[in-house]
Amino acid sequence: MDFVGSHILSVSQFDRHAIEEVFAVADQMEPYARRQRVTRVLEGAILGSMFFEPSTRTRVSFGSAFNLLGGEVRETTEVKASSLAKGESFYDTARVLSGYSDVIVMRHQQEGSVAEFADASRVPVLNGGDGSNEHPSQALLDLYTIRKELLSKNKTIDNLTIALIGDLRYGRAVHSLCKLLSLYNNVSFTLVSPPELTLPGDYVEDMRSRGHTVTLSSDMSGIGGADILYVTRTQEERFPDPSEAEKYKGLFRLNQTIYTEYCEPNTVIMHPLPRDSRANASELDIDLNDNPNLAIFRQTDNGVLIRMALFALILNVANQVDTHSRAVNWYTAKRF
Ligand code: CP
């Protein structure tokens, strides 16, 4: 895969070699994300950050990643604060905003919207999430986290056993992650969800056709034997009738009691976040917060590394990052 100048719209663009390339550059970014060193390699560059759907992690970590490489960020949030609200097309918006930026990250509720926008853009565009379709940078950071967590247990992504729990129909992070994991060998997937919210059939067919085992479970006993638990929120904003989502909230909750009953003591717990901590949902209970296998905040920290790596590769500065760097000159007690 040639990263330089490329749009990142789908994980289907990646093979294992390209993934390893991203991970190697992400590893190289650690001293900068940990505030041990500062680099100005993207000094003068501008990121257009356009999030037309709510976001905390993806929006802020893409922005932080660009800042950590020395670049500036210009943000547009919400459709109503942009001229899309006046009927402007993605084509015109892309033509205009790509004149103001060197690279753009975009999130929008409509599937395929980021690809449509990218077609008209004069600069590379990264998909920050398009409806229920894909969330490529989330899947890359999830895979990077899985690899790191398994490494400390002397395991690899090949031969992984993973349980995906919750709303697998509308969860775009799960969709992208399943595609990436399918590139590895002999993965066992257990899909724990209500039948109405299981993974779309084309994903399951593709995973099986690549030789992976896919098992469906409609109760939490399905999580037994997994190396990784990947819990997801009921994506109420994607239901045609949001009140319908209420039926599914709280059906599959992971808490310390369930974990102790079904899991090996070192089973890793992941979630793309945000988790819904309201009493009627609580799919990932806060009583797991002190469980050392809870990797959710290691995932969010890894997101900065992965997004720095994507920018460095797309803008062709990965091998210049260290030359434009120095030690930090302020107090820092950041611990990871
Ligand atoms: N995981 C994720 O996409 O989080 P945000 O919606 O907060 O960006």
Image (tube, helix red, strand yellow):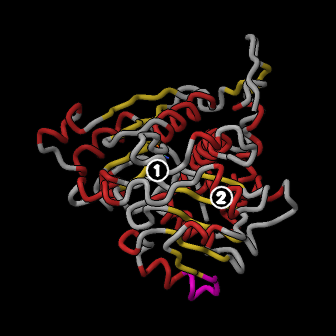
Mark 2 C-beta closer than 8 Å to ligand 1: no
Per the image, the residue denoted by label 2 is: 143
Counting from the top left corner in percent of width and height, residue 68 is at: 62, 29
Vertical order, 104 against 214 (above or below): above
Magenta stretch: includes residue 205: no
* Secondary structure at numbered mark 2: helix
Which circle marks residue 126 in the picture?
Answer: 1
Q: Are marks 2 and 1 in contact (CB under 8 Å)?
A: no
* Depth check, front residue: 111 or 312: 111
Counting from the top left corner in percent of width and height, residue 328 is at: 76, 17
Closer to the eye: label 2 or 1: 2
Alpha carbon distance from label 2 to label 1: 18 Å
* Residue type, numbered disc 2: Leu
Camera sees residue 9:
no
Q: Quadrant of the C terminus?
A: top right
Q: Residue furthest top?
A: 330
Q: Residue furthest left?
A: 86
Q: Residues within 10 Å of mark 1 (few under 14, many from 20)?
A: many
Camera sees residue 148:
yes
Span highlighted in magenta in the image: 207-213
Counting from the top left corner in percent of width and height, residue 224 is at: 68, 69
Q: Residues within 10 Å of mark 2 (few under 14, many from 20)?
A: many
Q: Residue at x 83, y 65 (%)?
A: 155
Q: Residue at x 65, y 39 (%)?
A: 289
